[in-house]
Amino acid sequence: MISLGINSGKGYDLRYRRTKLDYILLALAFLPVLVEWAFILYRGRAAGGGLPTGDVTEGAVALLVFLALGSSMFVPVRYFNFPFRITEANLARQYVLAIRLCQVLNLAAGCMCLGGYLGESVPWAVYLYIGAFVLMVLGVIAYMILAFRLR
Protein backbone atom coordinates (compact mmCIF):
# COMPACT_ATOMS: atom_id res chain seq x y z
CA MET A 1 0.00 0.00 0.00
CA ILE A 2 1.26 3.47 -0.87
CA SER A 3 0.47 5.65 2.13
CA LEU A 4 0.55 9.39 1.57
CA GLY A 5 -2.11 10.10 4.20
CA ILE A 6 -5.16 8.71 5.98
CA ASN A 7 -7.80 8.87 3.25
CA SER A 8 -8.10 5.61 1.36
CA GLY A 9 -8.95 5.10 -2.28
CA LYS A 10 -10.79 1.85 -1.49
CA GLY A 11 -14.15 1.45 -3.10
CA TYR A 12 -13.15 3.32 -6.24
CA ASP A 13 -12.37 1.77 -9.59
CA LEU A 14 -10.45 4.11 -11.82
CA ARG A 15 -8.87 3.27 -15.15
CA TYR A 16 -6.05 5.66 -15.92
CA ARG A 17 -4.36 5.62 -19.27
CA ARG A 18 -0.71 6.54 -18.82
CA THR A 19 0.56 9.46 -20.86
CA LYS A 20 3.89 9.96 -22.58
CA LEU A 21 5.00 12.09 -19.63
CA ASP A 22 4.58 9.12 -17.29
CA TYR A 23 6.77 6.93 -19.48
CA ILE A 24 9.33 9.73 -19.94
CA LEU A 25 9.60 10.09 -16.16
CA LEU A 26 10.03 6.34 -15.87
CA ALA A 27 12.79 6.35 -18.50
CA LEU A 28 14.53 9.29 -16.79
CA ALA A 29 14.39 7.39 -13.51
CA PHE A 30 16.03 4.39 -15.17
CA LEU A 31 19.00 6.39 -16.48
CA PRO A 32 20.84 6.72 -13.11
CA VAL A 33 20.38 2.99 -12.51
CA LEU A 34 21.76 2.23 -15.95
CA VAL A 35 24.73 4.56 -15.41
CA GLU A 36 25.43 2.96 -12.03
CA TRP A 37 25.47 -0.53 -13.56
CA ALA A 38 27.74 0.72 -16.36
CA PHE A 39 30.19 1.98 -13.72
CA ILE A 40 29.93 -1.30 -11.81
CA LEU A 41 30.75 -3.30 -14.95
CA TYR A 42 33.56 -0.90 -15.87
CA ARG A 43 35.14 -1.14 -12.42
CA GLY A 44 34.77 -4.92 -12.47
CA ARG A 45 36.47 -5.20 -15.84
CA ALA A 46 39.24 -2.80 -14.77
CA ALA A 47 39.83 -4.87 -11.62
CA GLY A 48 40.42 -8.04 -13.58
CA GLY A 49 37.01 -9.33 -14.58
CA GLY A 50 35.44 -10.08 -11.21
CA LEU A 51 32.58 -8.01 -9.87
CA PRO A 52 33.04 -6.81 -6.29
CA THR A 53 30.23 -8.03 -4.05
CA GLY A 54 29.68 -4.62 -2.46
CA ASP A 55 29.28 -2.92 -5.82
CA VAL A 56 26.83 -5.54 -7.04
CA THR A 57 24.83 -5.16 -3.84
CA GLU A 58 24.61 -1.38 -4.30
CA GLY A 59 23.53 -1.85 -7.91
CA ALA A 60 20.92 -4.44 -6.91
CA VAL A 61 19.49 -2.09 -4.29
CA ALA A 62 19.26 0.70 -6.88
CA LEU A 63 17.50 -1.66 -9.30
CA LEU A 64 15.06 -2.91 -6.64
CA VAL A 65 14.20 0.66 -5.59
CA PHE A 66 13.61 1.54 -9.24
CA LEU A 67 11.33 -1.47 -9.73
CA ALA A 68 9.37 -0.84 -6.53
CA LEU A 69 8.74 2.85 -7.21
CA GLY A 70 8.37 2.36 -10.96
CA SER A 71 5.69 -0.27 -10.52
CA SER A 72 3.63 2.19 -8.49
CA MET A 73 2.54 3.65 -11.81
CA PHE A 74 0.54 0.48 -12.43
CA VAL A 75 -0.93 0.02 -8.93
CA PRO A 76 -4.74 0.41 -8.76
CA VAL A 77 -6.15 3.41 -6.92
CA ARG A 78 -7.53 1.26 -4.09
CA TYR A 79 -3.96 0.65 -2.86
CA PHE A 80 -3.26 4.37 -2.36
CA ASN A 81 -3.90 6.36 0.80
CA PHE A 82 -4.22 10.04 -0.02
CA PRO A 83 -3.47 13.00 2.28
CA PHE A 84 -6.79 14.72 1.54
CA ARG A 85 -10.39 13.60 1.28
CA ILE A 86 -11.24 11.65 -1.87
CA THR A 87 -14.45 12.22 -3.81
CA GLU A 88 -15.61 11.22 -7.26
CA ALA A 89 -14.74 14.72 -8.49
CA ASN A 90 -11.12 14.80 -7.37
CA LEU A 91 -10.15 11.12 -7.49
CA ALA A 92 -8.54 11.18 -10.94
CA ARG A 93 -6.50 14.30 -10.24
CA GLN A 94 -5.29 13.01 -6.87
CA TYR A 95 -4.37 9.65 -8.40
CA VAL A 96 -2.38 11.23 -11.24
CA LEU A 97 -0.57 13.49 -8.76
CA ALA A 98 0.35 10.50 -6.59
CA ILE A 99 1.64 8.55 -9.59
CA ARG A 100 3.77 11.48 -10.72
CA LEU A 101 5.10 11.98 -7.19
CA CYS A 102 6.21 8.34 -7.11
CA GLN A 103 8.01 8.79 -10.42
CA VAL A 104 9.78 11.96 -9.24
CA LEU A 105 10.79 10.14 -6.05
CA ASN A 106 12.01 7.27 -8.23
CA LEU A 107 14.23 9.66 -10.19
CA ALA A 108 15.57 11.21 -6.99
CA ALA A 109 16.22 7.82 -5.39
CA GLY A 110 18.12 6.65 -8.48
CA CYS A 111 20.28 9.77 -8.42
CA MET A 112 20.91 9.31 -4.70
CA CYS A 113 22.00 5.72 -5.26
CA LEU A 114 24.30 6.81 -8.08
CA GLY A 115 25.71 9.66 -6.01
CA GLY A 116 26.32 7.32 -3.08
CA TYR A 117 28.06 4.80 -5.30
CA LEU A 118 30.27 7.34 -7.05
CA GLY A 119 30.95 9.27 -3.85
CA GLU A 120 34.06 7.22 -3.09
CA SER A 121 35.86 8.04 -6.30
CA VAL A 122 34.27 11.10 -7.93
CA PRO A 123 34.43 14.39 -6.00
CA TRP A 124 31.34 15.97 -7.59
CA ALA A 125 29.09 13.03 -6.73
CA VAL A 126 28.14 14.67 -3.45
CA TYR A 127 26.39 17.39 -5.48
CA LEU A 128 24.38 14.73 -7.29
CA TYR A 129 23.34 13.28 -3.94
CA ILE A 130 22.41 16.70 -2.49
CA GLY A 131 20.58 17.69 -5.67
CA ALA A 132 18.56 14.46 -5.58
CA PHE A 133 17.66 15.10 -1.94
CA VAL A 134 16.51 18.64 -2.80
CA LEU A 135 14.48 17.25 -5.71
CA MET A 136 12.87 14.75 -3.37
CA VAL A 137 11.91 17.41 -0.82
CA LEU A 138 10.65 19.82 -3.49
CA GLY A 139 8.63 17.01 -5.11
CA VAL A 140 6.85 16.19 -1.85
CA ILE A 141 6.20 19.88 -1.12
CA ALA A 142 4.85 20.47 -4.65
CA TYR A 143 2.67 17.36 -4.34
CA MET A 144 1.19 18.49 -1.04
CA ILE A 145 0.45 21.99 -2.36
CA LEU A 146 -1.14 20.70 -5.57
CA ALA A 147 -3.09 17.96 -3.77
CA PHE A 148 -4.41 20.54 -1.30
CA ARG A 149 -5.46 22.89 -4.11
CA LEU A 150 -7.17 20.10 -6.08
CA ARG A 151 -9.01 18.52 -3.14
Image: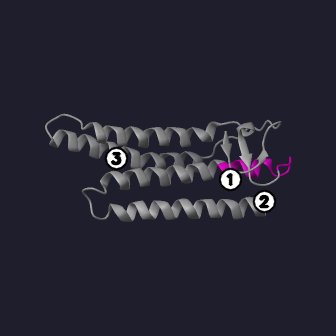
Q: Position of residue 41 (x, y in %)?
A: 25, 40
Residue 60 vs residue 43: left or right? Answer: right
Residue that numbered label 2 is attached to: 150
For the residues labelled 3 and 1, the Cα–Cα distance comes to 28 Å
Dot 3 amino acid type: Glu
Amino acid type, label 2? Leu
Task: Report the quarter where the C terminus lies.
Answer: bottom right
* Residue 89 drawn at (x, y percent): 85, 50
Mark 2 or 1, nearer chain start: 1
- Give the magenta-colored segment's residue range: 86-98
Q: Residue at x 52, y 49 (%)?
A: 106
The residue drawn where x is 45% and y is 64% is 131
Which residue has dot 3 on it? 36
Q: Main secondary structure of the magenta part?
A: helix
Q: CA distance from mark 2 to mark 1?
A: 10 Å
Q: Are marks 2 and 1 in contact (CB under 8 Å)?
A: yes
Identify which residue is drawn at 21% across, 39% down.
44
